[in-house]
Image (tube, rainbow, N blue to C red):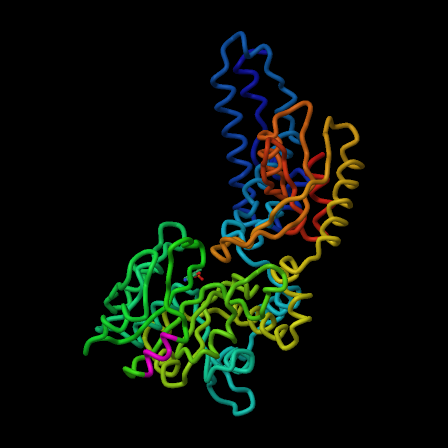
Amino acid sequence: MNKKDILRRIPKIDEVLQQQPLFDFFEAKGASFVTDAARSVIDSLRQEILALTDETAENFDVERLTHSRVAAAVIELIDEEDKNNLIPAINATGTILHTNLGRAPLCKEAVENVMKVSRSYSNLEYDVKAGKRGSRHDIVSEILVELTGADDAMLVNNNASATMIVLSAMAAGKECIVSRGELVEIGGAFRIPDIMEQSGATLREVGTTNKTKISDYENAINENTGALMKVHKSNYDIVGFTEEATLEQLVELGKKYDLPVIYDMGNGLMVDMSAYGCDEPNVPASLATGIDVMLFSGDKLLGGPQGGIIVGRDEYIKKMKKHPLARAIRVDKMTFAAMEETLKKYRDESVALRDIPVLSMISASEEKLKAKAEKLAELVAAECKDEAFNIEIVEVLDQIGGGSAPSVRLPGYAVAITSDEGTTKSLERRLRRYELPVVARIQHDQLLLCVRTIMDDELEHVAKALR
Ligand SMILES: *Cc1c(COP(=O)(O)O)cnc(C)c1O
């Protein structure tokens, strides 16, 4: 067929839109979205045909221009454009807090509460008993006080914004003394010292990278000192010839000079997890040393939504709640809804360990992980009978990750896979590009599916993805 005749066969847009399956899309997606998609498909067909030569025109499949085929192409385009950019993924890396994969997954009740509170109106800032304006700060401050032993608490956007408001309220225009060994970069090239400087406080660095003594802090104190601050070394360790001031020493020094002591502890661990190999400071124990104000993330080891929690003495927290920055870094109802449910789990430690995903992943027993790996191996073998896969169960060392507990390695299990037909790299890449992406690890040229971070109800999807 020659080019002119082919062009004549391109269907009219109105006729394409009359095709039943497309017609149904009209109501769901809106007329203009569907019409634009149809126009775009027809335009690109026309361009393709115009680019044909006399020879290639002969081979053009005119069946592609039937109404039903064009309608099908439009539906395909609509589906493609309608895909979300933010989608769930399966974490088979064995790294529990993977910042790139959204840090802590939420517990079931937190997710349900987000849905409940955000699909209707709520009492976010309304005191229903008194019938007058309320404060969103009250939503989680009571339970945080109950769990940590602080006077008061405040929830802001994340720990970086917590740093800003704490220093703005407590040390703006003054010097804040910090150890050189604790000036950390938290990822994405964001550095704690830069964030601190934004608050209007001046950083007074003391000590050296590996050693800071309490006397270094004391020697730096002058009439312009506003606060003493300790930053937890979340994502790195300094080992060897080292020394750092303890919280107790800083509290004592603060008392001596009547200066507040601030502790940026980062991870927000609420319970002692040392029995499970996670030897990190926890919030209640740190606060019990007499720290004045402490701040930490909501979505690290606390296992909740993104947030920055500030706990401490009344006078300071009160000042922060009234600070202009408080409005700029306040959190949404969805965050409060998820945080309140997450925090309630901590009323009983065994409930927290059972229900909060990051804690149950850390505390999972080796037997349980081995059984999970065996189940995954079985599912993969059954699902991939026709693939040239070699499947074995191997021991691995999982990590906490997400800038927490850098030296902790948790003994776990993985299903290791190699293929006789493709490279491990291509296997890893194709899993990642599956409609429900599976992010795996490569070690010794084997693909590792670390089961600690795979949820029970995801095992089947992993096997399907492999097929
Ligand atoms: C993670 C971390 C931060 C940053 O917290 P975000 O919640 O990511 O803003 C700040 N300080 C320390 C010590 C941290 O570990």
Quadrant position of residue 157: bottom left
Is 253 magenta? The answer is yes
Can residue 373 be seen from the camera position used here?
yes
Q: Nearer the viewer, residue 94 or 233?
A: 233
Can residue 29 be seen from the camera position used here?
no
Residue at figure coordinates x 69%, y 65% from the top left? 354
Is 333 magenta? The answer is no
Q: Position of residue 347 (x, y in %)?
A: 63, 77
Please tell me how many numbered marks the rendered image carries: 0
Q: Position of residue 154 (x, y in %)?
A: 45, 76
Q: Is residue 220 left or right of residue 211?
A: left
Q: Position of residue 115 (x, y in %)?
A: 61, 66
Q: Quadrant of ligand 1?
A: bottom left
Q: Is residue 162 left or right of residue 437?
A: left
For this orientation, the residue located farthest to the bottom is 130
Q: Nearer the viewer, residue 361 or 337?
A: 361
Query: Which portion, as a residue range, is magenta?
Result: 249-255
